[in-house]
Amino acid sequence: MIARTIDLEAVVDEDRAVRLRSLYAVHVHRVGRLAYLLTGDAALAEDLAQEAFVGLVARLRFIRDEDAVGGYLRRAVVNLVRKHWRKQGTERGYLRREGPGLVAGTATLPDLAARDELWQALGKLTHRQRAAIVLRFYEDMSEEETARVLRCPVGTVKSSVARGLGRMREELIRDEEFRT
Amino acid sequence: MKSSEPDIRRMLERRAAEFTIGPELPRELLRRGRRRRIKTIGLASIAAIAFASLVALSLSLAGARSPAGQRLAAGGRANSSSPSGSISDSTHPLKLVSYVLLDTAPKIGNPHGVTGQPITVAEIRQHAECMRAHGFDVPDPTEQSGGGWSTIIDDPVARGLDLGSPAFREAMFVTCGPLGGPLSGDMVIAGSPDKIDRFMSCMSGQGFGLPEPTMDLTGHYDAEEWQFDLTQTSIDTSTPEWNRSMFVTCFQGEG
């Protein structure tokens, strides 16, 4: 901690790399899947999962309790997804201001192979509603744990889940009406 | 209509299973992590300098303009014995985040809190009397509506108080207690890595070899907060020597 030679730093770094490889192998699937459920985009989820591990590298020397790594990564991914959507919101605002011609370029074709009513309904929720539902029903977290990860009161988690589920139901009803 | 919770759980499991990623750590990721670490340490140093300047500025403003008040110590909710507070000055921008009095098991959901005997307003009042007896014109604590207490010093310069002086700290943390200890569990200090290094080196020079700090990954602390698990050591934190090293010598002894 106080003073290190360059050689010792190299040894410490190598040790860190071995440890990180092991942590990556253990956690990357779960972290990536969480990112995928939060974004609905596999390529983006992979990027965000790796970004969470980049943050972990910077903190690795302070980790004593490796059981806490999963919690750290989960929280990091939720924060990264939130930042991503915030940035996207800013970009969409810019596109709206700059004119419809630019917006047309961002349209995507419907993914017929991935069609799933519930999945599509999930995609129409706000970030917080979606995150609350994924953390509660996929990660099996309690309302208190979800509130800690989302950094909001427990009441907000409850209302986010309830409103999210309500909106998903509305989407499904609308979808059924449209088909009939 | 497929919208029940079990349906949503099944859908999430099914969708999650579609996502695959290789278990091999990309080499680039390690390099990016190292760069991030270096950048973080650099930013932390800048932030520490900025924080120190801010503290110095607010202290000088306190002397010049006699603002509403300066908080000397705050906390001590009636059911808590964890006196958290800020102890910082222009030469040593470290902040004491958590400093837990010796007691029993941690509270559920808060590994840094403890249960048991609270610090009472009467004890703080006694402490203030002791400070006054030693020539430091500290006001009595005031009770807060939530059951806590605080001691606010209006215009410390006009009262002839230098809150950062070794004499004041000696009286505050060593002579008068009881804010001094004994302690157990976590001691958490915020500061840049080089300041923490110097603090640890100073404590070691005083005969108190602190354990390597760990960072709490459960979300309780920020990146620049360092947690020392004193239960790993045989340090007796109830002694005046500990309090003197901790609060007088090493928090401001060397810049």
Image (tube, rainbow, N blue to C red):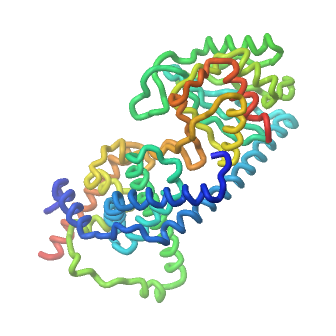
Q: Residue B23, percent across and down?
A: 34, 66
Q: Residue B30, percent across and down?
A: 50, 66
Determine whether, in the image, residue A60 is placed left or right of residue B93.
left
Determine whether, in the image, residue B178 is placed left or right of residue A19.
right
Image quadrant containing the N terminus of chain B: bottom left
Q: Which one is in front, B205 or B191? A: B205
Determine whether, in the image, residue B98 is placed left or right of residue B42.
left
Toward which corner of the image does residue A19 lie, by quadrant? bottom left
The residue that appears at 62% across and 38% down in the rendered structure is: B189
Q: Which one is in front, A89 or B46? A: B46
Toward which corner of the image does residue B115 lie, by quadrant? top left
The residue that appears at 47% across and 71% down in the rendered structure is: B27
Q: Residue A103, percent across and down?
A: 45, 83
> Up-down: is B179 above or below B246?
above
Say if residue B144 shows up in the picture: no
Q: Which one is in front, A73 or A22? A: A22
